[in-house]
Amino acid sequence: MFTQQHIKFLQQDLAQNKVLVVGDVMLDRYWFGNVDRISPEAPVPIAKISKIEDRPGGAANVARNIASLGGNVTLLSVVGEDEPALVLEKLLVTEQVNTVFKKDSTISTIVKLRVIAKNQQLIRIDFEEKPSHEILAEVLDNFAEIIDQYQVVILSDYGKGGLSHTSKMIEIAKAHDKIVLVDPKGSDYSKYQNATMITPNRSEMRDATGNWNNEQELLNKATELKQQLNLDYLLVTRSEEGMTLFADQAYNYPTFAQEVFDVSGAGDTVIGTLGLMLANNASIREAVEVANFAAGIVVAKLGTATVKKEELIKHLTQHIKEQEV
């Protein structure tokens, strides 16, 4: 249950303590248009493009979620020496995200191009290459140099090769007594060992542990995974089923989504909000409650979106009033 204490927490200066986000950044490029006819060349729709919009994606979307909530955040990642990298940097400057981008001339910056007509995605085209070992070694060195400036580290793994030194980064961060949150990818979670928390979604959890048929089986699998990886917490985001936090016991949080328009980027909102709350000394349960509520707002928006601090406070205030009725 939310109280005025949650509002007071969010109203304070959340930029006092800093968050470092490391991971795969990408440019989410949207081409909006209309489809009125089928191509005479092939049985495919013709999209007449009327608007192009660029948004920071991947780890960059995690960082902008933190900034939009009033946090002080730095993004450490690899990009190419190209136009998408310049666009990303410019966008992040306007959103008050500090960037430490290592430029790799041998690759192109990751771009996900989506063609959308009448709010329906027609096609997605991905441009991506893995960074060189030399550049990734530079990222690790930079990480070790700046880690002391931050209270929380978020490793945003999109499986694109930008987090090849995950285990070493966790080791360094923990040696400096930092909170380490990981948004995982793939089926091998051993590289996330000793993190403070990992936040798999439902399908990612299944990739790592296999399927479950009931809540008890999920509890058993989560408890085993948490012990294997030596985690303090495991948070499974479960779409319409809300979230489950595995700590000293299992805590369930129902979804607050009134309308689900687009779930892309919801995980970024969750881990970004968690990181900001924990950096400012919120309890784990308070952090998860607010992150769950923020995710319920963002899924009602199209594409990689964020929740502004004022927007979150407004929705929470309204929810508290409704609780009291």
Image (tube, rainbow, N blue to C red):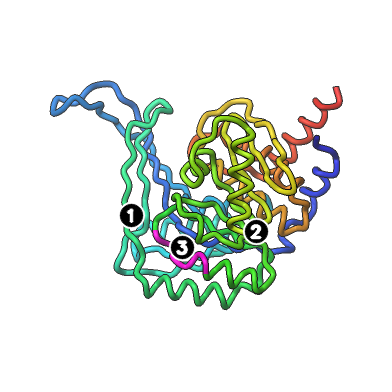
In this rendering, is residue 12 above or below 134? above
What is the C-alpha distance between the residues marked 3 and 2?
17 Å
Q: Disc 1 versus disc 2: distance between alpha carbons?
A: 30 Å
* Residue range (magenta): 161-167
Residue for point 56% across, 76% down: 144
Which residue is the site of mark 2? Answer: 196
Label 1 sits on a secondary structure element that is: loop
Q: Quadrant of residue 314?
A: top right
Left or right, residue 300 beside residue 164? right
Alpha carbon distance from label 1 to label 3:
15 Å
Residues tagged 1 and 3 counted as in contact (Cβ below 8 A)? no
Residue 55 or 66: which is nearer the viewer? 66
User: Residue at left 50%, top 61%?
Assistant: 191
Front residue of 4 and 267: 267
Quadrant position of residue 116: top left
Residue holding disc 3: 163
Instruction: Name the residue located 36 percent from the left edge and 39 percent from the top edge.
Output: 114
Q: Is residue 227 above or below residue 311?
A: below
Q: Earlier in the sequence, mark 1 or mark 2?
A: 1
Residue type at mark 3?
Answer: Leu
Badge nearest the viewer, 1 or 3: 3
Q: Secondary structure at mark 2?
A: loop
Number of the label disc, if any, that sits on residue 128 = 1
- Binning the other alpha carbons within 10 Å of mark 1 as few (below 14), some (14 to 19) or many (20 upward) gives some
